[in-house]
Image (cartoon, grey):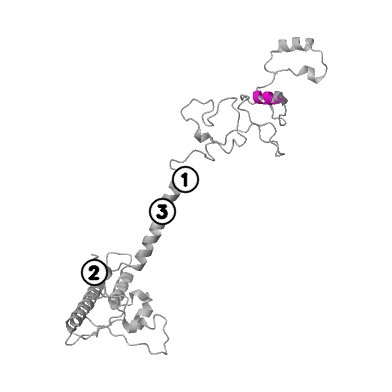
Amino acid sequence: MGAHLGRRYITERDTEPDPAKKSPFDPEFGFPDRKEREMVATQEQMNLAQLPVEQRDYCAHYLLKLMKCKRDNWPNFLACKHERHDWDYCEHQDYVMRMKEYERERRLQLRKKRIEAQAI
Amino acid sequence: MAGVGFRRWAQLLSKRKASGIPALISGCRAASGVSKDILPGPYPKTPEERAAAAKKYNLRVDDYHPYPDNGEGYGDYPMLADRSQHERDPWYQWDHPDLRRNWGEPMHWHFDMFIRNRVDTSPSPVSWSSMCKQLFGYIGFMLFMFYVGGVYASYQPVAPKQYPYNNLHLERGGDPEKQPEEVKHYEI
């Protein structure tokens, strides 16, 4: 659970990625062709719904659907399970993508270090 | 007046030498009545005055120490130890259990301050230096640990969250005229 912290601060201080810094590697590297993330909700739609800035991510269209469902079905607070699940699943996939990005960054750093060690 | 029956009162009146109203009022009074000889007086200068003052306050002559005579107005009132009523034995059968005081006992000048609801002079279970060390040691340790936690921050092993529209350039108050730097996000 805290293995990455041990690597970052103690064992592999030079290769463990720092999430605060921008990745020095090319995003397309290692992929034959990489698909861009698609944003479904428009800025105008998000403005009209008055979404907070933190919630204007790539899952905003599911959130807008959920908000509409809740407003239509009030006071039945048990009505929007399907929409809520869709939004939650989208957010979950987004988090898993973040984990994969971190791991990719880490492996690229290790690879870079291996190549440099070989060059010596 | 109630202490004397009507007959006795009439008998007493006939024996009295004084005339007028003082003749009618009987000599008996309630125990709470105050006369000048039990009130505090001026600072005692001679040994006889000291002995009399000690007797007045129900103290032994060796134990009687008046306040220094420097114009502060204590008179002959005794200087007792600055100990609050908390320090007195809770299990002894005091005459006044709440005040932990017996009848006739000399009262401290600041007796109202030393009652059990107010100032407590009882000794702390641990010495002052030990208490200071413990408190400041703990606070110092916590401050140090929080500083260390700031330097070596703890975080989840995830990349930063990705936002659309060039990291929400307009939504975050960016200049609408200025062209924001292009940010592309990919699926993985």
Disc on res. A11 = 2
Is residue B180 or residue B137 the one in the foreground? B137
In x, y percent, where is residue A90? 24, 74
The local secondary structure at tag 1 comes to helix
* Residue at 26% over, 70% down: A8
The local secondary structure at tag 2 comes to helix
In x, y percent, where is residue B13? 77, 12
Magenta span: helix, strand or loop, mainly?
A: helix
Q: Mark 3 points at which residue?
A: B137
Whether the magenta-drawn stretch holds residue A52 is answered as no
Write down the chain letter for disc 2: A
In x, y percent, where is residue A71? 33, 71
Residue at the farthest right position: B19
Which residue type does callout 2 highlight? Thr
B36 shown above or below A68:
above
Alpha-carbon neighbours of circle 1 within 10 Å: few (<14), some, or many (≥20)? few
Q: Mark 1 points at which residue?
A: B128
Magenta span of residues: B49-55
Q: Can you see residue B24?
A: yes
Which image quadrant is residue A113 in?
bottom left
| Marks 3 and 1 belong to one chain | yes
